[in-house]
Amino acid sequence: MNTRLVNVVIDAARPRVLADFWAALLGWHVAVEESGEVDVRAPETDGWDLDLVFVPVPEPKVGKNRIHLDLASTTLAHQAELVARALELGGRRVDLGQGAVPWVVLADPEGNEFCVLEPRDRYAETGAVASILVDAHDPAVLADFWARVTGRPIEVREGEVLVGLRAPSGRGPWLEFLRNDDVKRVKNRVHLDIAPPAGADHAAAVTEVIAAGAASADLGGPALPWRVLTDPEGNEFCVLTPR
């Protein structure tokens, strides 16, 4: 399957405000702003070949997000600097019942949770973002699906708790699936976009993704050039047009 991961999309009441927060925190830049959407892009040296895309939505955030970002740090002092920067930019600390852990749980100005990790060898070469972390009832099943539709091989299995996918280039963030028994109740506020390569047949790519285990998602609204699907655990994602 030739589809690949191209975006992490975050619903926002104020896309530009949220984009500015993340650009400043990560040291990235706003690359696109049109029709209310704002895209934040990493420098090429960071190894992240995706965009962080902020799109306007009227609905408020409800509950904990099922997808969040983990930020990498190189030293404990660097971790503390990242936490301080996030708080100065408008983030806040969040208690999700994590207890005494070496990472720090924060939320951005619209309440989207993220973690600032302590230094870990696995994330030494990822750049600013260590991982895109997805809650999963069955990490192995969900990771197998996403490995097929993104072309990312599974490179880490930690029992039944966590499965990690690495980009074929070996650069940029991991895509990881962490065991969590919470029930999905509302549309995800953070979702992933995949796309086939330029010149490919979009309809055929969608058919392949559905055959791999996705299902169609009817979210209403106008007809769009992309298709909205759900993965085997009901997480919404988009198959964009070829690019």
Image (cartoon, helix red, strand yellow):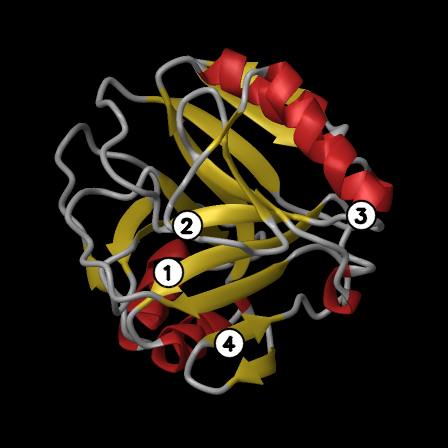
Is residue 57 positioned above or below 210 on the image? above
Amino acid under disc 4? Val
Is residue 243 positioned above or below 85 on the image? below
- Identify the residue shown where x is 83% and y is 41%: 77
Left of 15 or right of it: where is 59? left
Is residue 32 something one can see in this rendering? no
The first of marks 4 and 1 along the sequence is 1
Q: Distance between the residues labelled 4 and 1?
A: 11 Å
Q: Distance between the residues labelled 3 and 1?
A: 26 Å
The first of marks 2 and 3 along the sequence is 2
Neighbours of disc 3 within 10 Å: few (<14), some (14-19), many (20+): few
- Identify the residue shown where x is 24% and y is 23%: 60
Amino acid under disc 1? Asp
**What percent of the width, then of the height, locates residue 13?**
35, 16
Label 4 close to label 2 by CB (< 8 Å): no
Neighbours of disc 4 within 10 Å: few (<14), some (14-19), many (20+): many
Please give the residue where the numbered disc 2 appears in the rendered image: 67
Please give the residue where the numbered disc 4 appears in the rendered image: 163
Helix, strand or loop at mark 1: strand
The first of marks 3 and 1 along the sequence is 3
Neighbours of disc 2 within 10 Å: few (<14), some (14-19), many (20+): many
Label 4 close to label 3 by CB (< 8 Å): no
Please give the residue where the numbered disc 1 appears in the rendered image: 135
- Identify the residue shown where x is 35% and y is 51%: 66
The first of marks 4 and 2 along the sequence is 2
Left of 94 or right of it: where is 216? left
Please give the residue where the numbered disc 3 appears in the rendered image: 76
Q: In which quarter of the image is residue 145?
A: bottom left
